Image (cartoon, grey):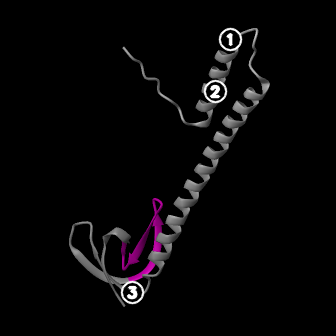
Amino acid sequence: MSETAAISTDSSGLQMQFMKLLVAQLQNQNPLEPMDNGDMTAQLAQISSLEQLEAINGHLSDLRGEAVGFGAALGAASLIGRQVTYTQADGTAAAGRATGVVQTDGTFALVVGDHVVGLDAVLGIEE
């Protein structure tokens, strides 16, 4: 029967796995041929590099999310003053002039009369 171990990819999990591996290597090394300090230093450098790459990846994901939000804000703002046709909550179509943009729950929506209209509900745009 084979067992599959779950592998953690967060930095604290990687550090713990690395430390367990390092301790196992030290415990099981041949006393007549101890582990080379250069090898140990190289392994420490690799885990440090991996942690830094993980942090960079997280920052890039945050930037990508901000860029998407900025693009949605610009798209919504470009509709101000235009006549839009949209689907209401009850499924019927309605039309009106977009007079503003609001942000609700991290998404941008148009203000059309007394209604807040999500960009995904917009069916058509006229001048």
Q: Count how many numbered circles sit on residues in the image.
A: 3
Q: Quadrant of residue 117?
A: bottom left
Front residue of 80 and 112 = 80
Q: Residue at x 57, y 37 (%)?
A: 10
Q: Amino acid at mark 2?
A: Phe
Residue beneath disc 1: 27
Q: Position of residue 20 (x, y in %)?
A: 63, 20
Kind of element beneath mark 3: loop
Front residue of 26 and 104 = 26
Q: Residue at x 22, y 66 (%)?
A: 90
Residue 118 in sight here:
no
Q: Position of residue 89 (x, y in %)?
A: 26, 66
Q: CA distance from mark 3 to mark 1?
A: 73 Å
* Crowd band around label 2 with a 10 angstrom C-alpha radius: few (<14), some (14–19), many (20+): some
Residue furthest toward the bottom? 127
Q: Amino acid at mark 1?
A: Gln
Q: Which quadrant of the figure contains the N terminus?
A: top left
Residue beneath disc 2: 18
Residue beneath disc 3: 82
57 on left or right of 120: right
Q: Position of residue 45 (x, y in %)?
A: 72, 36
Is residue 107 positioned above or below 125 on the image? Answer: above
21 on left or right of 102: right
Between discs 1 and 2, the one toward the N terminus: 2
Q: Which residues are the magenta region?
A: 98-116
Q: Nearer the viewer, mark 3 or mark 1?
A: 1
* Crowd band around label 3 with a 10 angstrom C-alpha radius: few (<14), some (14–19), many (20+): some
Between discs 2 and 3, the one toward the N terminus: 2
Q: Position of residue 103 (x, y in %)?
A: 48, 67
